[in-house]
């Protein structure tokens, strides 16, 4: 099965938009910024974080390494450095974006099925 890589159509994202896309809390993103030097969003005139689409892909990669692959923060940092040195970082980040998007889609579909099962179960005698 071939899975197409979701493309981020916007160039810049607010922290709220990134949270909605990645299903992460703002405090998690702020903590990751302190742990991963490549996550350093610019700030607009109001002082709000502005993430580039490239940074959002890297956030997906970090999420994948930490939550799916079960790396520690230090392990994820080392793994990302390996990807960078080998020239694979961009491709791996896009692949992680696809994988995590599919995981979230699956979870959303499971919630819909549970809801529908609950509604169907409630109508049966």
Image (cartoon, rainbow, N blue to C red):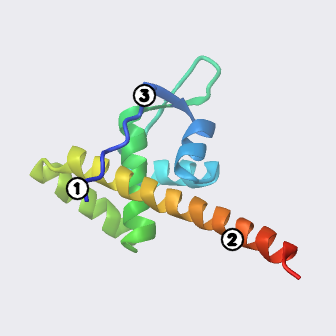
Write the residue at 22% across / 55% down.
81
Give the side of residue 104 with respect to residue 89, left or right: right
Q: Quadrant of the C terminus?
A: bottom right
- Residue closer to the observer: 71 or 123: 123
Q: CA distance from mark 2 to mark 1?
A: 40 Å
* Residue found at the very far right of the displayed protein: 125
In the rendering, at what x and y percent does residue 56 appear?
A: 43, 41
* Residue found at the very far front of the displayed protein: 125
- Earlier in the chain: of badge 3 and badge 2, it is 3
Q: Secondary structure at mark 1?
A: helix
- Earlier in the chain: of badge 3 and badge 1, it is 3
Query: Pointer 3: residues within 10 angstroms few (<14), some, or many (20+)?
Result: few
- Earlier in the chain: of badge 2 and badge 1, it is 1
- Residue closer to the observer: 99 or 64: 99
Q: Is residue 39 visible?
A: no
Q: Quadrant of the N terminus?
A: bottom left
Front of the two marks 3 and 1:
3
Quarter where residue 124 is shown: bottom right
**Which residue in the structure is indicated by mark 1?**
81
**Which residue in the structure is indicated by mark 2?**
114
Q: Is residue 97 above or below residue 12?
A: below
Query: Pointer 2: residues within 10 angstroms few (<14), some, or many (20+)?
Result: few
**Which residue in the structure is indicated by mark 3?**
9
Write the residue at 41% across / 69% down.
68
Q: Is residue 2 visible?
A: yes
In the rendering, at what x and y percent does residue 120 appear?
A: 77, 71
Front of the two marks 3 and 2:
2
In the rendering, at what x and y percent does residue 98 appear?
A: 36, 52
Give the side of residue 53 with respect to residue 124, left or right: left
Q: CA distance from mark 3 to mark 2?
A: 32 Å
Q: CA distance from mark 3 to mark 1?
A: 27 Å
């Amino acid at each position: 099965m071939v899975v197409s890589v979701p493309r981020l159509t916007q160039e810049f994202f607010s922290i709220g938009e990134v949270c909605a896309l990645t299903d992460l809390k703002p405090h998690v993103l702020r903590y990751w910024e302190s742990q991963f030097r490549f996550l350093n969003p610019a700030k607009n005139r109001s002082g709000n974080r502005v993430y580039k689409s490239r940074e959002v892909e890297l956030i997906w990669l970090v999420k994948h390494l930490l939550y799916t692959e079960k790396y520690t923060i230090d392990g994820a940092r080392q793994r990302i450095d390996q990807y960078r040195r080998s020239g694979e970082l961009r491709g791996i980040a896009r692949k992680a974006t696809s994988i995590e998007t599919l995981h979230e889609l699956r979870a959303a579909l499971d919630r819909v099925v549970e809801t529908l099962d609950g509604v169907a179960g409630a109508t049966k005698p």
